[in-house]
Image (cartoon, helix red, strand yellow):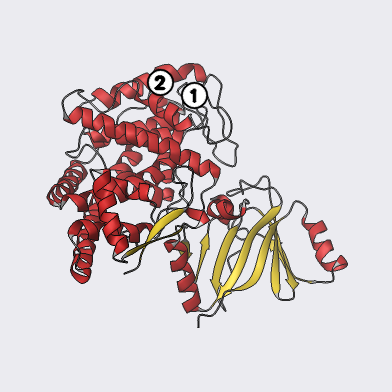
């Protein structure tokens, strides 16, 4: 058995993708640093929700909310999936930083699928031990009403994963093409007992990172969650065979879907960043506070009831954050209240949070 | 003052439609309004007049043409509210502001079972439909998550 082949992609789509991400990188690099951190705080949350696939608050492709609220009423399974996805994001972020300082050549490595799977399945979100970081040894079949497609036998998985990783890391194609290809290939091989969707989406991030100026595709995965139907459709379009046969499968539809959604996501990120900058400026002017205070106020508005730990990414220094919060609380602009039970999670269990009092 | 939502129906997934109908009609004395094939998935449905609310019964098929309902175990699958257009819009906005996924269609919206499970511990869709509008088809697959 062989891995699916790497399809070509229309050069125009690649150019549009590059231009959209360059324009967003330009905007983020020129935004006030606190506004940039506010954007990263929100977008990181959306990416973690998307890797974990907890259904997004944004559910209409044509009417996306610029600043969606954090998902609430999460089940324990969702929380454990988020915990794993959060760990994956930290790993990605760390690898991107190591590449930026020249310590490594690529964000992706041949060990990445196993690392991601171990991080995602380590908390055992399904309640069953699914051999974190290990390929499956047994066959995997869907129930017929879910999916008729049959994945390859477990004994074939190590070589198939190696083949797909080789193409994703070394083929002479744009990173956006190789990234979406790897997601398609891994979802088709289904090499793990569970967590294949989460691992495959995270692998897209790792490969795409190496082709982007910011070292992070901030837009794509959110769009995959919003357009879940398109995501499944593009995947199944390349799997129109009864059982896995790499030579008969075609990643073209998924690669096109991945590139287009990444491009759209970059445009949305740019609009989101501009919206945040406008909101911060408006709060600063209307309330006579400086830009750091205004950014904290907007962050509290975005969380509705914000735990202190959720605001920490806005400041490079904990004392600095506490100083700004103290000023806003003592002037009556922010107030501590009980956080609603629906917001308390394993990652953010805080009983109290801050609300904006205007 | 905002008009509250009004509960107008529930949907039950059942294993045996004949027995379910017998319970509601012969035993409890409700009227059977309709019975026939489900609109969107293989299976059969019946609607029962339960006074203030309509009870929809869905017996999903285990085989046949079309997309089968993946989760076929008997359960309460939907709680359906009616609302005037203003109350419907406000409920939809409030749901999104509170961090719940909202799936909207013309004149109605629903919160998927996956999200409601985090509040109630069971996979139940909450459907809010405009009063006077067509209710969602029974077996509409809202529980596919």
In this rendered view, identify the residue nearer to me: B108 or A101: A101
- Asked if residue A163 can be seen in this view, the reply is yes
Residue occupying the point 49% across, 70% down: B91
Q: Is residue A35 above or below residue A150?
A: below
In this rendered view, identify the residue nearer to me: A331 or B36: A331
**What residue sits right under mark 1 in the picture?**
A152
- What subunit carries mark 2? A
Residue occupying the point 30% across, 21% down: A166
Residue A232 location, quadrant: top left
Seen from this angle, which residue lies furthest right? B27
Residue occupying the point 42% across, 49% down: A228
Residue B135, image x and y in percent?
59, 70
Residue A176, image x and y in percent?
25, 37
The first of marks 2 and 1 along the sequence is: 1
* Apparent side of residue A176 relative to residue A4 in the rendered image (left or right): left
**Secondary structure state at the residue bearing disc 2:** helix
Residue A334, image x and y in percent?
33, 62
**Secondary structure state at the residue bearing disc 1:** loop
Residue A270 location, quadrant: bottom left
Q: Pointer 2 and pointer 1: residues touching (CB < 8 Å)?
A: yes
Residue occupying the point 21% across, 36% down: A215
Residue A186 location, quadrant: top left
- What subunit carries mark 1? A
* Apparent side of residue A146 relative to residue B77 in the rendered image (left or right): left
**Which labelled disc corresponds to residue B79?**
none
**Which labelled disc corresponds to residue A160?**
2
Seen from this angle, which residue lies furthest bottom? B1
Q: Residues within 10 Å of mark 1 (few under 14, many from 20)?
A: many
């Amino acid at each position: 058995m062989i891995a699916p082949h790497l399809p070509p992609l229309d050069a125009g789509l690649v150019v549009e993708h590059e231009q959209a991400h360059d324009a967003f990188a330009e905007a983020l690099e020129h935004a006030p640093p606190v506004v940039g951190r506010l954007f990263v705080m929100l977008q990181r949350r959306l990416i973690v929700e998307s890797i974990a696939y907890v259904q997004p608050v944004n559910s209409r492709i044509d009417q996306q909310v610029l600043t969606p609220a954090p998902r609430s009423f999460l089940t324990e399974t969702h929380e454990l999936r988020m915990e794993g996805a959060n760990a994956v994001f930290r790993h990605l972020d760390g690898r991107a930083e190591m590449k930026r300082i020249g310590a490594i050549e690529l964000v992706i490595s041949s060990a990445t699928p196993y690392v991601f799977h171990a991080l995602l399945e380590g908390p055992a979100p399904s309640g069953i031990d699914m051999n974190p970081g290990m390929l499956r040894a047994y066959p995997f079949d869907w129930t017929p009403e879910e999916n008729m497609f049959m994945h390859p036998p477990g004994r074939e998985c190590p070589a198939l994963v190696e083949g797909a990783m080789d193409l994703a890391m070394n083929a002479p194609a744009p990173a956006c093409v190789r990234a979406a290809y790897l997601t398609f290939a891994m979802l088709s091989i289904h090499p793990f007992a569970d967590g294949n969707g989460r691992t495959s989406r995270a692998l897209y991030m790792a490969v795409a990172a190496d082709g982007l100026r910011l070292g992070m595709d901030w837009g794509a995965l959110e769009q995959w969650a919003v357009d879940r139907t398109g995501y499944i459709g593009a995947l199944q379009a390349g799997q129109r065979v009864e059982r896995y046969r790499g030579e008969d499968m075609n990643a073209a539809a998924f690669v096109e879907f991945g590139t287009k959604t990444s491009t759209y996501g970059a445009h949305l990120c740019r609009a989101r960043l501009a919206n945040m900058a406008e909101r911060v400026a408006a709060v600063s002017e209307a309330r006579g506070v400086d830009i750091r205070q205004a950014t904290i106020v907007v962050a509290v508005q975005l969380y509705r009831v914000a735990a202190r730990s959720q605001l920490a990414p806005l400041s490079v220094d904990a004392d600095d954050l506490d100083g700004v919060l103290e000023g806003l609380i003592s002037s009556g602009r922010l107030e501590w209240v009980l956080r609603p039970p629906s917001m308390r999670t394993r990652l953010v269990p805080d009983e109290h949070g801050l609300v904006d009092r205007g | 003052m905002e008009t509250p939502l009004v509960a107008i129906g529930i949907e039950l997934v059942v294993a045996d439609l004949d027995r379910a109908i017998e319970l509601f009609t012969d035993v409890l004395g409700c009227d059977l309004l309709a019975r026939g094939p489900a609109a969107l998935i293989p299976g059969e449905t019946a609607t029962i007049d339960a006074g203030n609310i309509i009870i929809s019964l869905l017996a999903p098929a285990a085989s046949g043409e079309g997309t089968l309902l993946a989760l076929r175990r008997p359960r309460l699958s939907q709680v359906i509210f009616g609302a005037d257009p203003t109350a419907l819009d406000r409920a939809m906005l409030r749901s999104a502001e509170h961090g719940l996924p909202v799936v909207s269609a013309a004149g109605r919206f629903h919160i998927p079972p996956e999200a409601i499970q985090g509040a109630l511990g069971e996979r139940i869709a909450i459907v809010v439909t405009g009063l006077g509008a067509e209710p969602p088809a029974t077996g509409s697959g809202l529980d596919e998550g």
